[in-house]
Image (cartoon, rainbow, N blue to C red):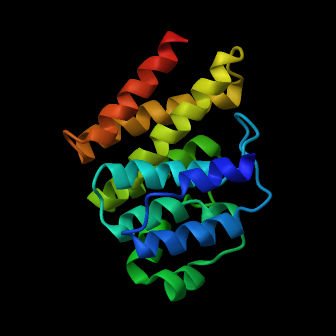
Amino acid sequence: MEAGVVDAMTRGFEELPLTQDAIDFARSRHEGQRRDADDAPFVVHPLEVAILLRDAGYPDHVVATGALHEVLEDTDVDKDELEERFGPEVAELVGDLTDDPSIEDQQERRAALRRQVAESGERTAAVFAADKVSKARELRMKADRGPLDEESQAKLEHYVRSLEMLERALPGSELVSRLREELGALDAV
């Protein structure tokens, strides 16, 4: 059943060959990982990010970045491997979306990532916005089951601060509007 859901999500990328390769790579590298919110295969999240970017009209390498944006943080993939397989542009974008593990305090690490994204340009900000739309949806699933724990509240604060940064970085963006809607729906829970 789960494989069928993931397979269904991967349809519609025929015109995006780099993204198709990125999806296959992400599926293999995230194999066995699960999402906290609903215990679905973790790869559902990067696939959703790729779908949001594709539907917003971004080019193949940006959509591919959406599918790969978690591999440096959550797998044993390194930037050199990404560059070799997907090219320097995708590897750089994924790197720009990866937090600095040397920053121990989670809130400081998240603030540093927001600054990094803000300084990295429109395409990085677009992938970050799509990521936050997906993550806010996951958080809403969690909130539907009961009060948010302390870590979830900290994530929500990060998403709100991310929205503030993204409104400056991507004025008028459909993805930013969707993030605002998702966060508004969380307030209503």
- Viewer-nearest residue: 181 or 158: 181
Q: Residue reaching furthest bottom?
A: 84
State which quarter of the image contains the C terminus: top right
Residue 131: x and y, percent?
Answer: 48, 47
Task: Examine the rendering and report whether any part of residue 97 can be seen.
Answer: no
Give the residue drawn at x 44%, y 75%: 18
On the question of residue 124 being in view, the answer is yes
Residue at the outermost left position: 172
Q: Residue drawn 46% across and 18% down?
A: 185
**How many badges with numbers are in the image?**
0
Against 130, residue 142 (above or below) is above
In the displayed orientation, state which residue is furthest to the top.
188
Task: Give residue 46's quadrant in the image.
Answer: bottom right
Residue 70 falls in image quadrant: bottom right
Instruction: Look at 37% across and 71% down and name the residue there.
Output: 61
Q: Residue at x 51, y 40 (%)?
A: 134
Residue 138's place in the image compared with 13, above or below, is above
From the top left corner, tell me how far across and down residue 174 is, in percent: 27, 39
Is residue 81 depicted above or below 171 in this figure?
A: below
Quadrant of the rendering where the N terminus is positioned: top right
Give x and y (percent) for residue 126. 34, 52
Up the image or down, 55 lies above or below 78; here it is above
* Residue 137 left/right relative to 26: left
- The image shows residue 122 at horizontal and vertical percentages of 27, 57
